[in-house]
Image: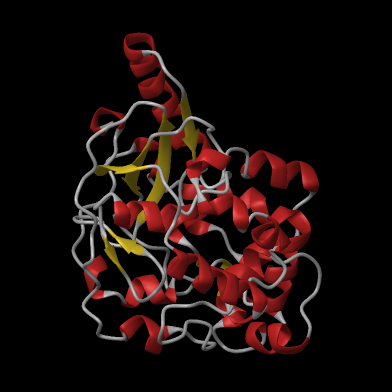
Amino acid sequence: MLQSGAVAVGFSCAADIGEETMDGYRRWISNGMHAGMAYLSRHTELKRNPRSVLTDAATVISVAFSYAPSSFRRSTLPVIACYAYGKDYHDVIRGRLDEAVRKLSERLGGSWRVCIDSAPVAERYWALKSGIGRNGRNGSVIVENCGCYCFLAEILTSHPVAPDTPSEASCAGCGACVAACPTGALRNDGKIDSARCLSYLTIEHRGEWEGEMLAAMRSDAGKNCLFGCDACLRACPHNRDVEPTRIPEFIPSEEIMTLDADTVTKMTQVEFSAMFKGSPIKRAKLDGLRRNALNILE
């Protein structure tokens, strides 16, 4: 797996997730903190056991890939989350892991499935269970040498593998991420209220903002977000002086690094599709990105 570009790999036994963890997730859903991401509530029980995704799963292989940037967009430009500086991680990581799994399957046989943020798998839980990082108060898993700037993926396999020691470590606990959250979306317990989260509001939310969502987007910070936020990541001391990603596809493109709000408001659908082909930014769709840009320019 490390040959695929991963910065960390760990193994754990595929089994039911602890009831305490499941209860916490259910409370988060029942309190409406997932906002408009209805798919999260639909998939709650599926996350309990990896065998809901691969019926004969015996092992969860947790993998982390760094996207730590070598530089950030100029402060005079609106924010674009740095995970979106390069190519879409779904495509990049799947291509790399599919090749690794192909070789393993040819050699070992058995069942395999690659999961990258699209299957009902509790990624952070399994990353900690597999010992590849520590729990961050900002809701992220902190991985050695890339901090929170990492993508998580899982490979489920029917092959039993000796598990690694689970990580019970936590972050520095300084609270810098909580203090940096401009809308109070990030709480002291590490839970995120999506309806107040600028990343959710500029990427996942469809349509216009209302109520507390509108208030968040009309704040000074909200009016500076074109796609995502990153305030909690930029504040985290574990992200200081990390080594930039070595994956070429995640290296920032000049178009993304210089994109401004005015350019977005003038884009046609054809131009949007061409510029953001293979980019995470296509997730917002033209209507969403234009909505964000107009909010910045008002």
What is the total number of numbered labels drawn onto the structure image?
0
> The C terminus lies in which quarter of the figure?
bottom right
In the image, residue 34 sits, relative to residue 246, either above or below, namely: below
> The N terminus lies in which quarter of the figure?
top left
Residue at image point 44% right, 70% down = 20
- Depth check: give the residue in front, 194 or 293: 194
Where on the picture, by quarter, is residue 162? top left
Q: Can residue 265 be seen in this view?
A: no
- Depth check: give the residue in front, 242 or 270: 242
In the image, residue 262 sits, relative to residue 282, either above or below, namely: below
Residue at image point 61% right, 82% down = 196
- Depth check: give the residue in front, 78 or 157: 157
Taking 38 as reference, is 245 left or right? Answer: left
Q: Can residue 230 be seen in this view?
A: yes
The spot of residue 211 in percent (x, y) is: 76, 88
Task: Identify the residue at the far top of this view.
Answer: 106
Residue at image point 79% right, 83% down = 210
The spot of residue 92 in percent (x, y) is: 46, 35
- Depth check: give the residue in front, 234 or 55: 55
The spot of residue 271 in percent (x, y) is: 72, 44
Where on the picture, by quarter, is residue 136? bottom left
In the image, residue 90 sits, relative to residue 144, either above or below, namely: above
